[in-house]
Image (cartoon, rainbow, N blue to C red):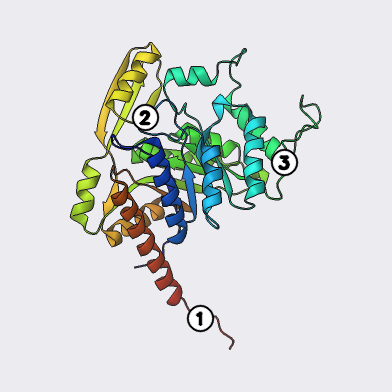
Amino acid sequence: MRNPAFKLSILDQSPANDSETSTEAFQHTTELARKAEEWGYNRFWVAEHHGSNRVIGSSPEVLIAHLLAKTTRIRVGSGGVMLQHYSPYKVAENFNVLASLAPGRVDLGIGRGPGGLPQSTKALQWDAVDGPMPLAEKVSELQRFLHNKLEKGHPFHGLRASPLPTQPPDLFMLGTNASSGEFAAELGMPYVFALFLHNDEDVMHQAIEAYRNRFDCSTGASPQAMLALPVIVADTDEEAARYASEVKVVRIKLESGRTLTVGNLEAGEEFGRQSGEQYKIEVSDANVIHGSPETALNKLMEVQRVYDAQEIFAVTAIDSFQKRLRSYELLGDIYQKAAARASSQAPSKGLN
């Protein structure tokens, strides 16, 4: 097996099945983060979702602080903060605190979607008298606050998002379509395509291509394409196939043209009701990369080769926490073994 040419990470949504409490779900996220560090994963990101009893991570900043305290080396971050709801200044302050507490270990991923139902969005933006600032402006302002680069003439010039960490959090953009790839490119940011929220590889290809073609190199940065993929690993191909067959993608299409992914059919119906629009719900089998450890890693390496991705986030949707934990353990183990084998077989560069 060849060397995996990508870093391997985890994006966890703090899922709770029907028999679990929120406390148990967060305990599972914490255990998974600690195990991920032990198994050699590069990053551990948590999601933001509002108004759900199945995906309960509504405050990634709070959860990140807890996970940083429970780990020592792994990078921890958001996948992602829904910046449309918040003040860039406050988000910068929150993550500067985290980056000061754990220098060099904090990531700030930004999501473009609402992260919840229409009523949740309304409640989060309740005091936005003049309407929310366009997201592009918010991201640009967040970048300036994080690096203390508010130019003269800016209404907040001289204001600092304290504390000022020795190493600001790394900033990423998440998305599910070509426009998000272009958006990240124009801002010169690393880009994570979330296939687990979209399920269409053609769209992923378009988004990554748009990102690379439109990337603004004037900032001195280079494009960094990353993928968040649905992955299930089990001891055998057959067992993994069974788990993968149970994973569905539920998307709601509103009359206004918006399309969003929701957790299940019930959430889709509730979203449509709250939107006040005509809507259509589509349920499809998820495009899950699955198999025994070697099968799954070979599939991931092929995806990486096609998209030249620097990093892959595994997103594993199995109701049973122990089986989900086992999936990540098997994947981390085969990844580390492949990397070690490739390293041991590399030509020596000793003295002549």
- On the question of residue 8 being in view, the answer is no
Q: Residue at x 50, y 30 (%)?
A: 112
Mark 3 lies on a secondary structure that is loop
Q: Residue 68 placed where, x, y %?
A: 55, 49
81 in relation to 129, above or below: below
**Residue to which mark 1 is pinned:** 348
Q: Residue 332 placed where, x, y %?
A: 38, 59
Q: Residue 86 placed where, x, y %?
A: 59, 26
Q: Amino acid at mark 1?
A: Ser
Q: Nearer the viewer, residue 180 or 279?
A: 279
Mark 2 lies on a secondary structure that is loop
Mark 1 lies on a secondary structure that is loop
Q: Quadrant of the C terminus?
A: bottom right
Q: Amino acid at mark 3?
A: Pro
**Residue to which mark 3 is pinned:** 163
Q: Residue at x 38, y 10 (%)?
A: 276
Separation of disc 2 and disc 3 at Cα?
34 Å
**First along the sequence among labels 1 and 2:** 2
User: Which numbered tag is attached to residue 53?
Assistant: 2
Separation of disc 1 and disc 2 at Cα?
54 Å
Is label 1 or label 2 in front? Answer: 2
